[in-house]
Amino acid sequence: MSITTLADKINEANAEGRTALIPFLPGGYPNKDIFWKEILELDANGADIIEIGMPFSDPVADGPVVEAASLKCLDAGVNLKWIIEGLAKVRSQISAGIVLMGYYNPVLQYGLEKFAKDANDAGVNGLIIADLPYEEGVEFRDLLAENEVALVPLVGLNTTPERMKLYADGGNGFCYFVSVLGTTGDRDSLPEEIKVGLKNAKEIFDIPVALGFGLKHPSQLIPLEGLVDAAVFGSALIRHIDDGKSSAEFMKVWKK
Amino acid sequence: MKRGYYGDFGGQFVPELLMPPLLELEEAMGRILKSAEFQQEFTRLLKDFVGRPTALTHCANLSRELGFNLWLKREDLAHTGAHKVNNTVGQALLTKMMGKPCLLAETGAGQHGVATATAAALLDLECEIYMGAVDVKRQSHNVRRMELLGAKCIPVESGTQTLKDAINAALRQWIANQRTTHYCFGTAAGPHPFPLLVREFQSVIGREAKQQFKERTGEMPYMVVACVGGGSNAIGMFHEFVNEKSVKIVGVEAAGTGKPGCTNSAPINLGTPGVLHGMNTLLLQTDEGQILPSHSIAAGLDYPGVGPEHVHLHDCGRAQYGMVNDSQAINAFHVLCRKEGILPALESSHAVAWVLENKDSIPKDANVIVNLSGRGDKDMGILEDYLKQHGK
Ligand SMILES: Cc1ncc(COP(=O)(O)O)c(C=O)c1O
């Protein structure tokens, strides 16, 4: 699997004149039995990249919806091994790019080298580690790159152009722009200052820019026309599934 | 050594959104802490408000029995009843000089919450305290104290509803309110520069102890001992002695009930390396890196991690870290009450207990200073419950 896959996936969607779609679900949600079916359904209904959460007991960057969902998965016995082995089995049926998202400690305990290798073998294209800023992540980024897995940089409203440049130098996959000074969770409106941040990111990164945290409805993207290459949504999708509705139905609203 | 590291431990494992406020804090520390304005005001507050220097008490009765000299550094005599206030007054003053109007803090037992609310009231800062919902119930007395001091106490319903979740909630809140708010972290742990900042403010304990002891005896102590939760009172006592090679340094962790496999708060003795709350340290965790709940009868020791500098002092052999269980701590509590007329906090009782348990390995006539990190009034409810459960 090539390291440019994630950027390619987003570029392909953009070439069709649409924002790429990146749904997020915690591994094993809503339960272990139907999780992979949900992933296949997201893939079949227009996901360009799918983010699978790696549950952690202390998810500092997450809001209440994602945290509760992740803890439920942990209680059900989900771990990295379950996610990676399960993915390896279904990967050939998924055309979307696959990104794993989580926190550093479970990955560290799994073993950084083993993780990089197993993730690549299972068809993972990228990794997002919420609590691994640039300074702590350089060596792991290189190790992942050797295994053709991108370490996706996360930046936000308070990230200076200087720090964005750090991430951009050698950053791969796509740039994940966090829409709010806050945690994951859907919000009704996005801050106005987001435009300046996105413009900076678009200039500094030569990989696509995805917007995430707080997205609830496609109309939120209209004022950001031309500044966002991909949209990530987690809490809104989790809520939708909690209401007993299908992933396909959720994707329909976003896929235009 | 890498910036923000103690040997292999420490670092800044936080979401990128928290890097700017951490860098801002580091910059402010460099600029403000050394200024004459800060130093004068901090020294004045420590003296006039906190009540420093705290006494160094020679325990004559116990020393006679033990055959060596037991001294107590009396942080229980500091305002609000524990060492915590040294740190919160320092951080509140720094916050004020940084031009931020709000303080945010986590608390487990409530001691750090009370100390933060106290400093906030003194310096006219708004104050929000996050506290696990389980702890809010266990420590309702301290919740009322915080509210009287004008702070807002917010129960945290997620996770295990204890200190570690209160830290998660406070970090989340700091992400959102970083422009107006300083996170007044309660112990010498967390992401850089907190272990350094908290040590800076707590090292007054060791500085005073060394000077007072020298004045009284003309010597260096044989050993200094302190309990370790996150490790702030201990690093405060140890820092001044780390370069005094003749002085033995002992930290004391909480072994819980002490039964094999029991829930404990002893990550240096029983934990494994990992990353939590922004630091690479030793943790109570599963093989898969999920954080385990901790337990100690001393609420202030009840934390699954520990400050990174302690792990380093342990690794390089400069300090030794022992363990004391609940019943040994309770015993030491009673001994100190009866023999010396001092009600120690259950946290500090762990440090006293280590000395009692290891008395045979301490030379005759040696001088041992134990940091009495706080007073025991706050623990009366816990003690009564414990004694009832154990049929006493
Ligand atoms: C009296 C007392 N001693 C010790 C501690 C432990 O904290 P640390 O190890 O950070 O000094 C606490 C924490 O609440 C405390 O209240």
Image: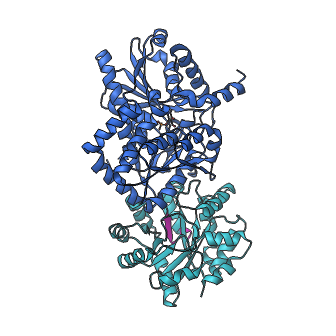
Q: Residue at x 45, y 15 (%)?
A: B59
Question: Residue B225 placed where, x, y %?
Answer: 43, 26
Q: Is residue B24 above or below residue A14?
A: above
Range covered by the magenta-colored residues: A121-129
Q: Is residue B44 left or right of residue A38?
A: left
Question: Residue B367 placed where, x, y %?
Answer: 38, 17
Q: Residue at x 63, y 36 (%)?
A: B262
Q: How is the image coloured?
A: by chain
Residue A124 in magenta stretch:
yes
Question: Residue extending furthest bottom?
Answer: A16
Q: Residue at x 30, y 43 (%)?
A: B38
Question: Residue extending furthest right?
Answer: A244
Of residues B48 and B23, the one drawn nearer to the viewer in this rendering: B48
Q: Chain coloured blue: which letter?
A: B
Q: Residue at x 65, y 62 (%)?
A: A69
Question: Residue B51 placed where, x, y %?
Answer: 40, 30
- Name chain A's colour: cyan
Q: Is residue B211 left or right of residue B194?
A: left
